[in-house]
Image (cartoon, rainbow, N blue to C red):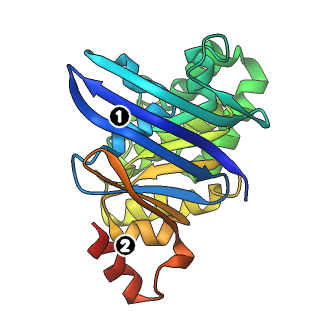
């Protein structure tokens, strides 16, 4: 099985306080990798390291090596001259815990990033927007109101719009930080179903606090405790049925 990421001796601290330390991990390119662990274990910091978003926070210090499968080859994203940060964050798209649509129309939420990052406009951009909205199941819900403010959408629709915005930029990897945490059950299930649909198209790494969700979506798990990797394993290594939920819960 191929890899989408190789992390060696990753350490990150903020204002001198360690968030993760000495992390080594190899993430498979197939399926969905789920980062699990209790609050404060370092999951989000680990996830943000994969597109160097930690570096935007005050007091950041970091070290280690991160290689990602981009353009068909493993690239060291921490090495100067490999990729600029704008291109990295386009190729490694991210969706956050709370929906964060731009304070613009539904249409401009996707069109503006396309213009700024890909230089796309006109019919080409329209096609990319429509494809992204269809992929996230939003097209039929918003096609007749694309010029209305995005903040009028429901929470679940806003999160799917944020996912569509990332997909429109043609990423190679998706990072998701508890993407259903702020949603109701029905909206959360819609997001989960779309992620299962997308897992064959993209390398996906996500953080989840829900054991049920982790088991539904995950094919590979990385367990973090106190900022380090305590265990990593494939879903097939867990017991079947309800025993899997108990086994995963006991690990936490």
Q: Which mark is residue 184?
A: none
Q: Quadrant of the C terminus?
A: bottom left
Q: Which mark is residue 151?
A: 1
> Residue 6: x, y in percent?
59, 41
SS type, badge 1: helix
> Residue 231: x, y in percent?
41, 61
Name the residue located 63 percent from the left edge and 19 percent from the top edge: 87
Q: Is residue 137 above or below residue 252?
A: above
Q: Quadrant of the N terminus?
A: bottom right
Regarding residue 179, the answer to whether it shows in the image is yes
Decide if residue 147 is on the left or right side of residue 149. Answer: right
Q: Which mark is residue 212?
A: 2
Decide if residue 72 is on the left or right side of residue 231. Answer: right
SS type, badge 2: helix
Name the residue located 65 percent from the left edge and 45 percent from the top edge: 4
Q: Is residue 101 above or below residue 81?
A: below
Decide if residue 138 is on the left or right side of residue 1. Answer: left
């Amino acid at each position: 099985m191929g890899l989408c990421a190789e992390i060696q001796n990753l350490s990150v601290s903020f204002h001198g306080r360690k968030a993760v330390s000495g992390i080594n991990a190899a993430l498979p390119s197939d399926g969905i990798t789920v980062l699990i662990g209790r609050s404060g274990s370092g999951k989000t910091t680990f996830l943000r390291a994969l597109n160097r978003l930690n570096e935007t926070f005050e007091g950041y210090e970091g070290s280690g090596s991160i290689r990602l499968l981009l353009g068909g080859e493993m690239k060291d994203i921490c090495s100067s001259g490999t990729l600029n940060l704008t291109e990295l964050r386009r190729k490694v798209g991210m969706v956050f815990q709370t929906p964060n649509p731009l304070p613009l129309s539904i249409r401009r939420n996707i069109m503006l990033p396309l213009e700024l990052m890909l230089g796309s406009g006109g019919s080409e951009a329209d096609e990319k927007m429509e494809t992204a909205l269809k992929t996230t199941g939003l097209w039929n819900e918003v096609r007749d109101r694309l010029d209305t403010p995005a903040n009028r959408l429901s929470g679940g629709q806003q999160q799917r719009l944020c996912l569509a915005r990332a997909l429109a930029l043609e990423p190679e990897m998706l990072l998701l930080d508890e993407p259903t945490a702020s949603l109701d059950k029905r909206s959360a299930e819609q997001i989960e179903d779309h992620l299962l649909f997308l897992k064959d198209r993209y390398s996906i790494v996500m953080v989840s606090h829900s054991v049920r969700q982790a088991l539904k979506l995950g094919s590979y798990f990385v367990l973090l405790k106190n900022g380090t990797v305590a265990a990593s394993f494939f879903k097939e290594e867990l017991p079947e049925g309800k025993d899997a939920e108990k086994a995963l819960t006991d690990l936490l």
